[in-house]
Image (tube, rainbow, N blue to C red):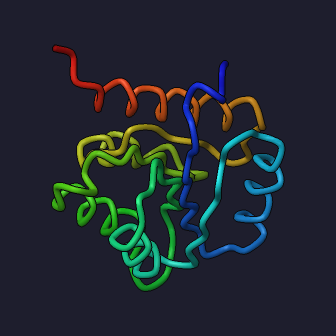
Amino acid sequence: MNWNSLGDVKLLIADDDAFNRQLIIALLVKMPNIEVVEARDGLEALKILRQNSIDMLLLDYHMPKMNGDELLKRIKKESRLSKIPVAIITTDESDMRHLYALGADDFILKPFDFQELRHCIYRHIQEKENRTICRV
């Protein structure tokens, strides 16, 4: 994986559990060019998404104020936000089919390991970059 080829990456972690956010940040701290932004709930995440250029969202499914399901629906309704890759972070595989139908791009099952997280982020950022390149 050539992380430098991706340029600067801004990643939003939306999770109400501060420990989970810090764990992900600790795993990503050594990755080049990644800036991490944190949200404690779905409403805060939506505000951040609307005010910033975010390359990927790691979204906890169970959150207060606005859960992952509702946030995903709102993101996919807004044209500027709908292209942002969303990986759902969960311990429950039972909702995967439903969330894929709503537009989730991937799932990261807890507990996750560094390699899985890293590959997921790299793959989706690379795909996003390839989608935005105009071929003439």
Question: In which quarter of the view is residue 130 placed?
Answer: top left
- Please provide percent x and percent y for residue 1: 66, 18
Residue 60 at x, y percent in the picture: 53, 61
Q: Would you place residue 26 above or below residue 50 in this image?
A: above
Residue occupying the far top of the picture: 136
Front-most of 14 and 97? 14
Q: How many marks?
A: 0
Q: Residue furthest bottom?
A: 65
Residue 127 placement, left or right of 117:
left
24 horizontally vs 42: left or right: right
48 up-or-down from 115: above or below: below
Which residue appears at 54% of the width and 60% of the height?
12
* Vertical comparison of 86 with 71: above or below: above
Residue 135 vs residue 49, the one in the foreground = 135
Where residue 93 appears, as percent x and y from the top left, is 50, 43
> Up-down: is 23 above or below 30?
below
Q: Quadrant of the C terminus?
A: top left
**Residue at left offset 37%, top offset 73%:** 51
For the point 83% across and 43% down, which residue is it?
30
Q: Position of residue 107 (x, y in %)?
A: 50, 41
- Front residue of 46/112: it is 46
